Image (cartoon, rainbow, N blue to C red):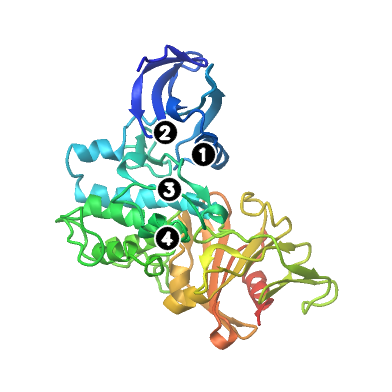
C-alpha cells in the first residue's frame, strides 16, 4: 500500500489505522495549522454501492449531530478514483483499545470512563440512532478542556467513533444485515429477523464494562466478578446490561448510565424526593422527543375544540388524547425504539408550537407524551422518572400531583445550558393499561400550574 501525499487540501503524514471498510490517515491543514483524521473508503469496496452509501451515511450522521461527545466531521470529498473520504477532528489521544493493550486502567478511571461512553451513546439514542458496534477500538480520546462534556480532570474528552454500522431506529429492524464485533455484539444481532434497538447498544456497554471492570473479561451474564476497587453494586448493572433477552436489559444508554451512577455513588445521587436535591449525573439530555432513542412517528388526528374550553384543541394518537395549549400543535403516532410485547411500537406524540423542530430547538417549549405497557411491567412511575437524569441540571425535590385520574410523579430540573427547565413526569394510566410518560419544556416564565394543566389534559382510553 502506497501512502498518498495529498488528499484534497491536506498533506498526508502517516497512516492511523486500517479497518474492514476504510483506511484512516493523519492529515495536516496548512491554512489552519491543525491536524485532521481523513477516513477513505477501501479500494476493494469502492464499487459496492451499499458500502459506499453506508460510508457516506456515517459522515452525514456525525455532521448532522455535531456533538462534543462524538467524533466531528468537518468535510467530505472524493478522490480522483471516485472513492469518498470524510475529514474528521483528530482524536490525538488514541483509542481505548490501545490503552487496554498496555494493561488495565485504574478502577476509578475505568468506572468514570464507562459512564462517559454511556453518555456519548445516549446522544445517539436520543436522536434515534443505534450504534451496533461498541468496542474499545471505537472509543477515542481527544485533548480538550476540563469544562467540556465527557472531559476528565486533565481535559481529555471521550469520543464515540465509527458509526458505519449505525442506522436510524426506524430502519434498524427486519432483514438487517449481521453487523457488529463478536464479544461485544448483542445476541439478537445474529438474527436477521430480530428487532435491533437501543438495547443492543446497552449490551455493548455491558460488555465494555466487563472488559474494563471485571476479573474475567470473557464472561457475560450472571456472576460478573469485579476487580478490586470497583463498587460491588456495579456487578448487578453489568449483569442486567448483558442479559441474553433484550427485555431484561436497561432500555437505553441513559438508563444504563443512571444505574451505573447509582451503583457507584451508593444511591446518593438518585433522582428521588428528599432534602438533598443537587446536580444529577447523567446524560446531557436535550429533550427526548425521545427516551430510549424514541421519537414520535408522524400520525394522529387533531380536533379544534377540546375539554380545555372554547378555542382549545385536542390531538389523538392511538389511545392517547391530549389537550393542546394555545398555539400548540401535535404530531406523532408511535414511540420509536420502544416495543410492546407484540413487537409493535408503543404509542406516543410530540406537541409544541413547532412540534417537528422541538427536539432540536432549545428555544421552543413543548412536550413528549408516551404510553408504555412494557415500562409499567418492569418499574414504577417514580422508578421510570429516576432512570432519566439530566447532566448540567439541578433536580428539585420530587412532587406528586393527581390530574385527570392519574397520580403523577414529577421532577423539575433547572439547567445551566440548553433548555432552562425540563420536567419529567410519569404515572399509571387509569385501569393500569400502561405507564404514561411526559417530558415537558415549559414556556419561559411558566411554573407548576402550566405543568399540572398540561398533565390534566393527557388522557388514555
Of circles 4 and 3, the one toward us is 4
* Disc 1 + disc 2, Cβ < 8 Å: yes
- Say which mark, if any, is on residue 120: 3
- Residue 69 at x, y percent in the picture: 44, 43
Secondary structure under tag 2 reads loop
The Cα–Cα distance between marks 4 and 2, rounded to whole angstroms, is: 25 Å
Q: Which residue is mark 4?
A: 199
Residue visible at 64% across and 63% down in the picture:
367
Q: Which residue is mark 2?
A: 21
Q: Which residue is mark 1?
A: 54
Earlier in the chain: of badge 3 and badge 2, it is 2
Residue visible at 42% across and 67% down in the picture:
271
Earlier in the chain: of badge 4 and badge 3, it is 3
Local crowd at mark 4 within 10 Å, few (<14), some, or many (≥20)? many
Secondary structure under tag 4 reads helix
Earlier in the chain: of badge 3 and badge 1, it is 1
The Cα–Cα distance between marks 3 and 1, rounded to whole angstroms, is: 21 Å
Amino acid at each position: 500500500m502506497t501512502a498518498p501525499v495529498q488528499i484534497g487540501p491536506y498533506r498526508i503524514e502517516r497512516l492511523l489505522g486500517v479497518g474492514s471498510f476504510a483506511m484512516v490517515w493523519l492529515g495536516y491543514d496548512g491554512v489552519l495549522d491543525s491536524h485532521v483524521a481523513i477516513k477513505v473508503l477501501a479500494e476493494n469496496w469502492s464499487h459496492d454501492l451499499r458500502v459506499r452509501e453506508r460510508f457516506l451515511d456515517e459522515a452525514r450522521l456525525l455532521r448532522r449531530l455535531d456533538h462534543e461527545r462524538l467524533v466531528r466531521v468537518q468535510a467530505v470529498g472524493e478522490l480522483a478514483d471516485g472513492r469518498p473520504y470524510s475529514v474528521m477532528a483528530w482524536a490525538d489521544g488514541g483509542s481505548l483499545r490501545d490503552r487496554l493493550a498496555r494493561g488495565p486502567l485504574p478502577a476509578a478511571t475505568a468506572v468514570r470512563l464507562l459512564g462517559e461512553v454511556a453518555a456519548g451513546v445516549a446522544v445517539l439514542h436520543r436522536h434515534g440512532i443505534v450504534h451496533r458496534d461498541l468496542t474499545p477500538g471505537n472509543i477515542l480520546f481527544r485533548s480538550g478542556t476540563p469544562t467540556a462534556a465527557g472531559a476528565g480532570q486533565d481535559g481529555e474528552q471521550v469520543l464515540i467513533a465509527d458509526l458505519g454500522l449505525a442506522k436510524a431506529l426506524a430502519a434498524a429492524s427486519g432483514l438487517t444485515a449481521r453487523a457488529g464485533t463478536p464479544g461485544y455484539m448483542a445476541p439478537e444481532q445474529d438474527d436477521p429477523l430480530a428487532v435491533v434497538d437501543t438495547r443492543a447498544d446497552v449490551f455493548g456497554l455491558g460488555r465494555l464494562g466487563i472488559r474494563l471492570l471485571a476479573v474475567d473479561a470473557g464472561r457475560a451474564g450472571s456472576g460478573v466478578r469485579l476487580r478490586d476497587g470497583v463498587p460491588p453494586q456495579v456487578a448487578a448493572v453489568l449483569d442486567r446490561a448483558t442479559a441474553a433477552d433484550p427485555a431484561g436489559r436497561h432500555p437505553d444508554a441513559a438508563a444504563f448510565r443512571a444505574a451505573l451512577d447509582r451503583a457507584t455513588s451508593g444511591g446518593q445521587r438518585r433522582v428521588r424526593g428528599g432534602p438533598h436535591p443537587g446536580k444529577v449525573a447523567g446524560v446531557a439530555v436535550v429533550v427526548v422527543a425521545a427516551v430510549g432513542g424514541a421519537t414520535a412517528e408522524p400520525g394522529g388526528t387533531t380536533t379544534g375544540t377540546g375539554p380545555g374550553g372554547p378555542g382549545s384543541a385536542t390531538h389523538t394518537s392511538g389511545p392517547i388524547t391530549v389537550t393542546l395549549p394555545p398555539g400548540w400543535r401535535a404530531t406523532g403516532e408511535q414511540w420509536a425504539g420502544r416495543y410492546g410485547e407484540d413487537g409493535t411500537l408503543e404509542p406516543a406524540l410530540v406537541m409544541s408550537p413547532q412540534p417537528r423542530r422541538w427536539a432540536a430547538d432549545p428555544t421552543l417549549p413543548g412536550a413528549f407524551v408516551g404510553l408504555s405497557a412494557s415500562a409499567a411491567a418492569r418499574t414504577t412511575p417514580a422508578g421510570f422518572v429516576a432512570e432519566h437524569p439530566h447532566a448540567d441540571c439541578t433536580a428539585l425535590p420530587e412532587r406528586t400531583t393527581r390530574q385527570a385520574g392519574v397520580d403523577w410523579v414529577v421532577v423539575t430540573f433547572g439547567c445551566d445550558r440548553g433548555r432552562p427547565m425540563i420536567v419529567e413526569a410519569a404515572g399509571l394510566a387509569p385501569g393500569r393499561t400502561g405507564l404514561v410518560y411526559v417530558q415537558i419544556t415549559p414556556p419561559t416564565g411558566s411554573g407548576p400550574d402550566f405543568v399540572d394543566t398540561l398533565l390534566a389534559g393527557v388522557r388514555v382510553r
